[in-house]
Image (cartoon, rainbow, N blue to C red):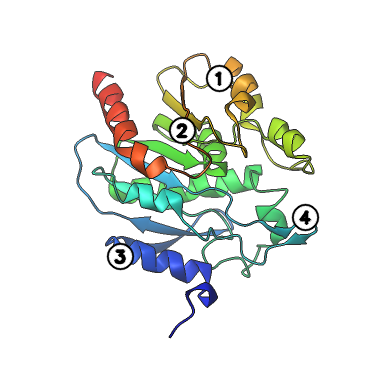
Amino acid sequence: MICSACVEPATRVDEEAASHGFERRTVLGTSFFHRVYLNNKKGRSGSLHIYIEGDGLPWLRSNLTSSDPTPRVPLILLLMAQDPEPAIYLGRPCYFGFAQTQPCNSWWWTDGRYAPEVVDSMAAALAHLMSIHKNTSVVLIGHSGGGALAMLLATRPIRVAAVVTLAGNLDTEAWTRLHHYSDLTGSLNPALMAKLDQRITQLHFQGGKDENIPPTLVTRFASRQPYAYFKVYPELDHRCCWEEKWPEILQMLSRLMSVE
C-alpha cells in the first residue's frame, strides 16, 4: 500500500488535475517557472478564467520554513473543475515542484510571497498563455493569498475584465497585525494600491466564520475600491465550503459580464 501522506504535494496536485482531465504545462515567467493546468474548454464569454491558489504551507512552525509551500489541498483547482469556461490554474513561483530550483528560496513564499518580482513573473507567464489562447481578456480568480495576487496582477498591463476573490488576503498589514506575524517585508499590499478602473468588475467574497481572514480586515481595502462588490457568506469559514457556493458565484459573474 502506498502512503498517500508520503506522496510529494506537487505529485498529489498533478494527480488531482489529471483526474479532472486538465492538461499540465510548464511556463517560464521572468526568472521563475510556473506550473499551469488547462481545462481546454471552449466557453462563450471570450474571457479566460485564471485561477490562483492560496499560500499553501509557507511555514511548518513559527521558526521553521517549509521546504515546499505547495498546498496540500488545492481548493482553487477543485473550483476550476466546476467552471464551464476556458480556464487555467496558474501556479505561483517556486510552488508545484520548483521550490528547489533557481532562483527559489524560502523568502519567496514567506516574506516575499507578494513581492513585485512574484507578480511580474506571473504576469509574464499569463501574457504568454494569453498569446497562445488568443483570448481577449482574463478574469482573475484567487483564494486567500491568491486573492491578493489576483488584485496585484490586475494592476499589470494585462487585459483584465474582472477580479474575483474568495477569503482574499486584501490587507496584508492588517492580517499580520491580527495574528502577530512578522511583517511581509518586500511584499505588496492590495489595500494600499490605487483603485482599479471601474470597467474592471470586482467581486469579493468573505466567510463570516473565517478566523484567518475575517471580513473586518477588508475595511481599508474597500475604502480604496469604490466600484467593488462585497458579500459575506455567514456560514463559510476560510476553506469551507466554497465549492458549494462556487456555481452561484460563477452565475453571478456571468450575468455581470454579459451586461457589460
Q: Nearer the viewer, mark 1 or mark 4?
A: 4
Earlier in the chain: of badge 3 and badge 1, it is 3
Q: CA distance from mark 3 to mark 2?
A: 29 Å
Which quarter of the rendered picture does the C terminus lie within? top left
* Tag 2: amino acid: Glu
Q: Which residue is labeled 4 in the image?
A: 62
Q: In the shown orientation, is residue 196 left or right of residue 179?
A: left
Other residues around mark 2 within 10 Å, as few (<14) / some (14–19) / many (≥20): few
Residue drawn at the location 25% of the way across and 36% of the way down: 46
**Dot placed on the residue nearer the N-terminal end, 4 or 2:** 4
> Which residue is identified by label 2?
235
Helix or strand or loop: what does disc 1 sit on?
A: loop
Q: Is residue 252 above or below residue 99?
A: above
Place of residue 112 in the rendered image (x, y in percent of width and height, measured from the top left): 70, 48
Q: Nearer the viewer, residue 82 or 154?
A: 82
Q: CA distance from mark 1 to mark 4?
A: 34 Å
Q: Quick check: 240 left or right of 87?
A: right
Q: What's the residue type where badge 4 is placed?
A: Ser
